[in-house]
Image (cartoon, coloured by chain):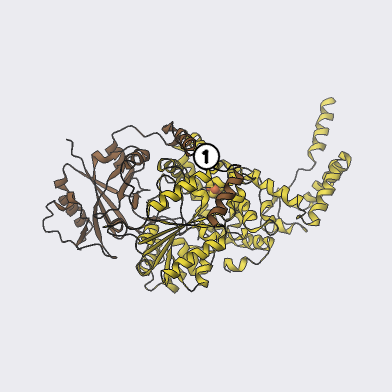
C-alpha cells in the first residue's frame, strides 16, 4: 500500500465514509463566503487611490509614494527619487512593454538583475487599498527576483488598477491562468527577529517607492 | 547552555533553570510584550473581529471534515501545474523523501526558509546526516543555527537571545560582520552573509502556510523576503506541508491570512505573501525547474475525528504562547518539544507520547487566555484537561500526586477535618510572611526562590464568615 492510500484510508475511516461527492462540498465552501463583509474589516471612507497611498506609507508598512498624472511622467519621478537617495548605479528595468516604451533620457540600465542590484523598476498588476499591497505575477517579462534582489524597489502602479479588498484581487485573478508565482508585497522587507525591534532590508528591498499613475480617461 | 543540552534534563529542572535565568525573562518579555500590545491594537480596529474569527473557525472545520476531498483536489491541481506530489505517513518517511530529492539533484547545499513542520519531522538533522549543508535563511533561524540552539517560539525562534549575544555570534561566524552592535547593522551583516548562500544553493526548502485546493498553489508568508529568495533561485524547490494546511480557494485563504497575521505580529498583512504554483514555465525569467510538494501526516489523521480534532485548525500564529503566563515565565526551551506554549502542550503528547510529556499538560493555570486570543477559537484549556484525565486514567501520575489527591479528597469529604487543616495552614504560612508577602519558606523553595506569594489573611474564609455571622446575630 502506498502512503497516499494509507493516508487517504485513515482520513476516510476517521470521517466514516468511503468516498465523497465533490459538488456538495464545493457548494458548502462557497456558502461560507456568502457574506464577504464578515471576513474582512470595513474600509475607511475615501477613494481607493488615497486609501492605498495612506496605508502603504504608514510607518509600520514603510513604503513611500508619489503620484504622477501620466505614464510619460514616470522617468522624471524616478530621476528625482534616485537623486534624493544619491544613487547613480545603473538600474534594472522590467522588460514590460509600457515601461520599455518610455523616454528614460540618459538613465543607465543593467541588462538583467544582479544579486547586488541597487535599483530595480517594476510594474505592479494591482494594488490593494485595504492592506497597501502590490501584486506581481511571474511571467516571461516579469522576473520574480525583481521584487526581491534590489535594495531600492521602484514600482509603477496605475490608479485604475487599485482594488478595495484582497478578495477583489482573488476574483480578478480567477479569470486568468494561475501564475507560477503570485507575489503580494506590502512594504519593504523588515524583521523583528532581534529583540522584537524593527529593522528594514532584512533580505528583500530596504526601500519600496511607488509611483502611482493617476491618469483619468 | 544551548537548548540541545536542556533536552536531556527533566521538565522540573528545565523549568528551574529557565526561572533562574533573568536575561531570558527580559528577552521573552520584550518580544511577547510588544506582540501582545500590537495584536490588541490590530484587533481593536476591526469592529467585528469576533465574526471573522468565527468564520475562520468554520472554514477550517469545513476543510477538516472534508479532508479527503481537498487532498485529492489539491493533488490533482498541483500535478496539473507541473508539481510532483509526495505523501509521507511519518516524519521519517517525509525526511527520506526530502533527502532523496536532494541526492537526486546532487545537492551539496540547501537553503531553508523557516518551517515548523520541518522542525517537527526533524529535517535539519536528517539533512545533516545525509551530509548536505543546510543554511537557514530566516534571520531568527539563522541565529538559532549559528548558536546551535533550537527555536524557542514558533514566530520568533530566537526570542531567547539578546542583541549582545547575537552581535557576538555574528562577529564569530560572518565573513564581514557588522562594526557596531546596532540592530540595523547586524541585519545588514546577515543580509550580506546569506545572499551568498541563496546564490550557491542547489535546493530550496520551504514550508507552507496554506495549500490552495482549487489551484494547487502553496502559500508562504514572511516579512523578510527570504522565502522567495529560497524558492526562486535554486534549481529545485521542495515544500513540506502538513495535510491540515488545506483551504478551498484563494478567497478562503485571504480570510485566514487576515486572522493569522493580526494574531501573530499585530500587522494587518505580511510584507511578502506568495502563492507558488508549479515549476518554471516555458519562457519564465526565473523560478525552479523542479517543484516538489511533500504532504505529511505524522499523526494528523490520528487527531482527525478524535479528541484533538479541534487542534487541526491551528494556524501556527503563536498568539497563545505570547499570552500564556507559563510560557512568559519559562520560555520555549523548557517545554522540550518542537512546539512550545499552550498549543505545544497539546501537541507534544500526541507527537512524542504522553508518558514523556505529562508534565507539560500540568504546566498550565487554565486561565483561558490562550483560547481567547486564538484566531480560530481552539479550546486549548479543554484539550489540556483531556490530556490530564488521560494521564490519570493511564496511571502515569506519580504516586506522590495520587497520594496527595487521595488525602485531599478524604479531607474534602470530612468538612471538620478540612476546616481544621486549612486553619492550621494559614497560621503556619503567616509565620513566614513579612509586609504582606511570603518571600521564603522551607519545603516551598521551588516557589519562593523565583517569586513571592501573598501572605494569607489571619483567618480562613470560613472562620471570618462565621465570625461575621456571629456579630450580625448580636
Ligand atoms: S493554537 Fe491558536 S493561538 Fe495557538 S498557535 Fe494555533 S492558532 Fe495560534
A74 versus B398 height, above or below: above
Quarter holding the C terminus of chain B is: top right
Q: Position of residue B165 (x, y in %)?
A: 49, 67
Q: Is disc 1 placed on a helix, strand or loop?
A: helix
Question: Callout 1 environment at 10 Å: few (<14), some (14 to 19), or many (20+)?
Answer: some
A183 versus A151 height, above or below: above
Please identify the quarter of the rendering in which residue B6 is found.
Answer: bottom right
Q: Position of residue A97 (x, y in %)?
A: 18, 51
Q: Is residue B342 visible?
A: no
B249 or B257, nearer to the observer: B249
Tell me what residue is drawn at x 48 percent, y 67 percent: B99
Q: Position of residue A167 (x, y in %)?
A: 37, 39
Residue for badge 1: B62
Left or right of B134, for residue A150: left
Single out the residue that lies furthest toward the top: B473
Q: Is mark 1 within 8 Å of ligand 1?
A: no
Tell me what residue is drawn at x 58 percent, y 57 percent: B331
Q: Is residue B288 visible?
A: yes
Q: Position of residue A70 (x, y in %)?
A: 16, 43
Chain in brown (letter) = A
Chain of the residue displaying label 1? B
A216 versus B238 height, above or below: above
B438 or A126, nearer to the observer: A126
Chain in yellow (letter) = B
Quarter holding the N terminus of chain B is: bottom right
B456 versus A142 height, above or below: above
Left or right of B394, for residue B161: left
A54 or A6, nearer to the observer: A6
Tell me what residue is drawn at x 24 percent, y 59 percent: A119
Left or right of A144, for residue A30: right
A87 or B74, nearer to the observer: B74
Amino acid at each position: 500500500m502506498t502512503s497516499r492510500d494509507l493516508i487517504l484510508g485513515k482520513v476516510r475511516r476517521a470521517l466514516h465514509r468511503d468516498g465523497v461527492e465533490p459538488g456538495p462540498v464545493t457548494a458548502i465552501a462557497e456558502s461560507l463566503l456568502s457574506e464577504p463583509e464578515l471576513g474582512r474589516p470595513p474600509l475607511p471612507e475615501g477613494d481607493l487611490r488615497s486609501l492605498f497611498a495612506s496605508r502603504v506609507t504608514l510607518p509600520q508598512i514603510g513604503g513611500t509614494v508619489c503620484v504622477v498624472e501620466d505614464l510619460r511622467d514616470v522617468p522624471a519621478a524616478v530621476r528625482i527619487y534616485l537623486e534624493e537617495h544619491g544613487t547613480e548605479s545603473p538600474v534594472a528595468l522590467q522588460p514590460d512593454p509600457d515601461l520599455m516604451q518610455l523616454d528614460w533620457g540618459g538613465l543607465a540600465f543593467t541588462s538583467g538583475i544582479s544579486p547586488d542590484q541597487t535599483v530595480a523598476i517594476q510594474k505592479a498588476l494591482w494594488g490593494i487599498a485595504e492592506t497597501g499591497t502590490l501584486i506581481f505575477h511571474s511571467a516571461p517579462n516579469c522576473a520574480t527576483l525583481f521584487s526581491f534582489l534590489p535594495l531600492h524597489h521602484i514600482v509603477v502602479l496605475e490608479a485604475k488598477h487599485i482594488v478595495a479588498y484582497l478578495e477583489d484581487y482573488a476574483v480578478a485573478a480567477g479569470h486568468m491562468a494561475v501564475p507560477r508565482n503570485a507575489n503580494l508585497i506590502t512594504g519593504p522587507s523588515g524583521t523583528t527577529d532581534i529583540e522584537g525591534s524593527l529593522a528594514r532590508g532584512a533580505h528583500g528591498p530596504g526601500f519600496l517607492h511607488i509611483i502611482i499613475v493617476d491618469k483619468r480617461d | 547552555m544551548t537548548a540541545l543540552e536542556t533536552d536531556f534534563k527533566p521538565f522540573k529542572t528545565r523549568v528551574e533553570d529557565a526561572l533562574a535565568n533573568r536575561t531570558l525573562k527580559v528577552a521573552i518579555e520584550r518580544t511577547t510584550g510588544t506582540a501582545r500590545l500590537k495584536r490588541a491594537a490590530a484587533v481593536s480596529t476591526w469592529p467585528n473581529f469576533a465574526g471573522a474569527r468565527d468564520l475562520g473557525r468554520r472554514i477550517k472545520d469545513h476543510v477538516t471534515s472534508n479532508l479527503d476531498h481537498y487532498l485529492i483536489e489539491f493533488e490533482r491541481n498541483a500535478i496539473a501545474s507541473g508539481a510532483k506530489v509526495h505523501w509521507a505517513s511519518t516524519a521519517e518517511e517525509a525526511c527520506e523523501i526530502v533527502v532523496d530529492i536532494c541526492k537526486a539533484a546532487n545537492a551539496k547545499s540547501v537553503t531553508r526558509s523557516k518551517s515548523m513542520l520541518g522542525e517537527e519531522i526533524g529535517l535539519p538533522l536528517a539533512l545533516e546526516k545525509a551530509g548536505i549543508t543546510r543554511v537557514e535563511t530566516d534571520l531568527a533561524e539563522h541565529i538559532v543555527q549559528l548558536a546551535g540552539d533550537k527555536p524557542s517560539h514558533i514566530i520568533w525562534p530566537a526570542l531567547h537571545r539578546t542583541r549582545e549575544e547575537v552581535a557576538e555570534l555574528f562577529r564569530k561566524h560572518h565573513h564581514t560582520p557588522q562594526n557596531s552592535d546596532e540592530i540595523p547593522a547586524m541585519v545588514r551583516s546577515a543580509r550580506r552573509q546569506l545572499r551568498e548562500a541563496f546564490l550557491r544553493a542547489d535546493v530550496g526548502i520551504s514550508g507552507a502556510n496554506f495549500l490552495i485546493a482549487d489551484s494547487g498553489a502553496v502559500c508562504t508568508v514572511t516579512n523578510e523576503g527570504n522565502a522567495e529568495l529560497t524558492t526562486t533561485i535554486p534549481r529545485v524547490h521542495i515544500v513540506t506541508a502538513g495535510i491540515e494546511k488545506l483551504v478551498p480557494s484563494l478567497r478562503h485563504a485571504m480570510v485566514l491570512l487576515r486572522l493569522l497575521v493580526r494574531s501573530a505580529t499585530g500587522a494587518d498583512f505580511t510584507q511578502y505573501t506568495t502563492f507558488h504554483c508549479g515549476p518554471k514555465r516555458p519562457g519564465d525569467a526565473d523560478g525552479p525547474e523542479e517543484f516538489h510538494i511533500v504532504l505529511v501526516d505524522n499523526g494528523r489523521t490520528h487527531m482527525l475525528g478524535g479528541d484533538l480534532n479541534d487542534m487541526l485548525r491551528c494556524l501556527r500564529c503563536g498568539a497563545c504562547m505570547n499570552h500564556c503566563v507559563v510560557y512568559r515565565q519559562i520560555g520555549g526551551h523548557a517545554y522540550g518539544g518542537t512546539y512550545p506554549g499552550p498549543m505545544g502542550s497539546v501537541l507534544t503528547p500526541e507527537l512524542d507520547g504522553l508518558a514523556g510529556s505529562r508534565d507539560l499538560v500540568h504546566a498550565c493555570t487554565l486561565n483561558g487566555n490562550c483560547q481567547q486570543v486564538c484566531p480560530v477559537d481552539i479550546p486549548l484549556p479543554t484539550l489540556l484537561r483531556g490530556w490530564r484525565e488521560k494521564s490519570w486514567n493511564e496511571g502515569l501520575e506519580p504516586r506522590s500526586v495520587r497520594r496527595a489527591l487521595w488525602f485531599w479528597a478524604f479531607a474534602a469529604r470530612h468538612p471538620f477535618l478540612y476546616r481544621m487543616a486549612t486553619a492550621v495552614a494559614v497560621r503556619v504560612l503567616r509565620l513566614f510572611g513579612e509586609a504582606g508577602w511570603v518571600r521564603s519558606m522551607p519545603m516551598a523553595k521551588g516557589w519562593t526562590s523565583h517569586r513571592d506569594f501573598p501572605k494569607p489573611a489571619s483567618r480562613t474564609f470560613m472562620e471570618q464568615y462565621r465570625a461575621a455571622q456571629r456579630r450580625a446575630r448580636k
